[in-house]
Amino acid sequence: MEIKVVKKVMALNDEVAAEIRALLLTRGVFAFNIMGSPGSGKTTLLERTVAAAKADLRPAVIEGDIATTADAERLARLEVPVVQVNTGPFGGDCHLGANFIRAALDDLPLDAVRTLFIENVGNLVCPAEFDIGENRKVAVLSVTEGEDKPLKYPLMFREAAAVVISKVDLLPHLDVDARKLRDNLAAINPGLKVFEFSGRTGVGLDAWLAYVRNEISL
Amino acid sequence: MEIKVVKKVMALNDEVAAEIRALLLTRGVFAFNIMGSPGSGKTTLLERTVAAAKADLRPAVIEGDIATTADAERLARLEVPVVQVNTGPFGGDCHLGANFIRAALDDLPLDAVRTLFIENVGNLVCPAEFDIGENRKVAVLSVTEGEDKPLKYPLMFREAAAVVISKVDLLPHLDVDARKLRDNLAAINPGLKVFEFSGRTGVGLDAWLAYVRNEISL
């Protein structure tokens, strides 16, 4: 009984996701679904990306959070179109569903947009299970989370096309083995593109931007 | 329709949680439900706690993860009873439910246990929604996650009786305002007990242990 209902919810989500994907294709918009733990540096990655490449990416951002509009305010300062989606402050959804994205698209000037960044709710589990109509799933994993996370949260890293290892400026202060982290990522998903990044120093930004530009021009 | 089913699942969970709470009371076991983001330092806190106070806490540990037995192995090295619960590697549950705990208790020598630490799945959202029969909910929040997390994930910090702010040794290397973090915690839950802790230096361990000892002796 429970299973049937869950299947129905998932099927409905997938239908809406397919509709979004078709709509974005028509409008010439390429969408990234940016996922990762709370505080892994998703918003900082987007701030850096938008600030460095606003002219050619022509970005828009959908910010997903359970509560607050803090992240949307951070991006809006960079003068790009931003929509905040709140999944609900009291036991709100632990991930973005396609329905949230479908509604948010109505508030974006899609004709002026080439790249859509969707920042998912901070969570290394649930967002990986939901198609939201994106073209690429990207996981952000901070070095402070430890090298074992790909093994402990495998679905996220199996679903992702790329992973941004963030906060690498902190490596000298941690007992974390970055090589082991990369080995664990490769063990879970050999095809994963891996980038290292620091929002504080800007290291790695160019390689990430090259990836984004390459993907949207496909 | 969906709502009815979810209610049924929650009601069933609460029934099993109540049963666990009654059982633990009979056996003289006090249980902490340790929650927090992936890589926030939950396992390290437990390692330090068990190593420093095994004699009087007489601890046992239930380790919750989607996949791997890595955390249980870490605790087992300290020669305390440990059970690993895997919620399932392919889209596994994003939290521990009471049914997992009920089953795990059968594998613990409860007569020799005074304090039960249950480490939940790394997730700042879903675990806060599920009663698993614990006596106290504790959130672990690392300073690297940023000072805004209590506002963005309010349910976790409303439900918790205490929060351990972890990795405080990294503060000199971060653009994070620890005072603002404490203010945000107080804004969400004025009654929250707040501890600062570093697994690397051991700072703050004594205050945390004093809290644990005080709670289990109530």
Image: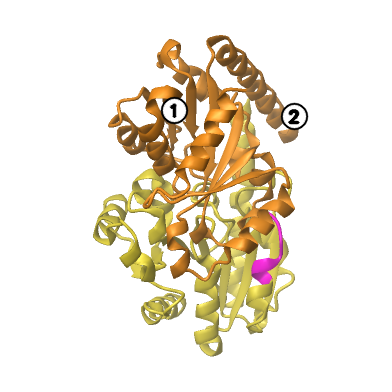
Chain colours: A yellow, B orange
Q: Position of residue B141 (x, y in %)?
A: 53, 51
Q: Residues within 10 Å of mark 1 (few under 14, many from 20)?
A: many
What's the chain of the residue with tag 2?
Answer: B
Both marks 2 and 1 on one chain: yes
Q: Answer with mark 2 or mark 1, whichever residue precedes in sequence.
A: 2
The amino acid on which the numbered mark 1 sits, given as a three-letter code, is Ile
Q: Amino acid at mark 2?
A: Lys
Using the image as rendered, state which of residue A17 and residue B84 is in the foreground: B84
Q: Badge 1 sits on which subunit?
A: B
Whole-angstrom CA distance, mark 2 to mark 1, is 31 Å
The vertical placement of B52 against A41, above or below, is above
Q: Residue at x 67, y 28 (%)?
A: B10
Q: Could you say which quadrant of the image residue A208 lies in?
A: bottom left
Q: In the image, residue B42 lies at what x, y percent? A: 45, 43
Q: Residue shown at 67%/39% (left/top)?
A: B159
Question: Can residue A92 be seen in this snapshot?
Answer: yes
Q: Range of the magenta residues?
A: A66-72
Circle 1 sits on which residue?
B62
Residue topped by disc 2: B4
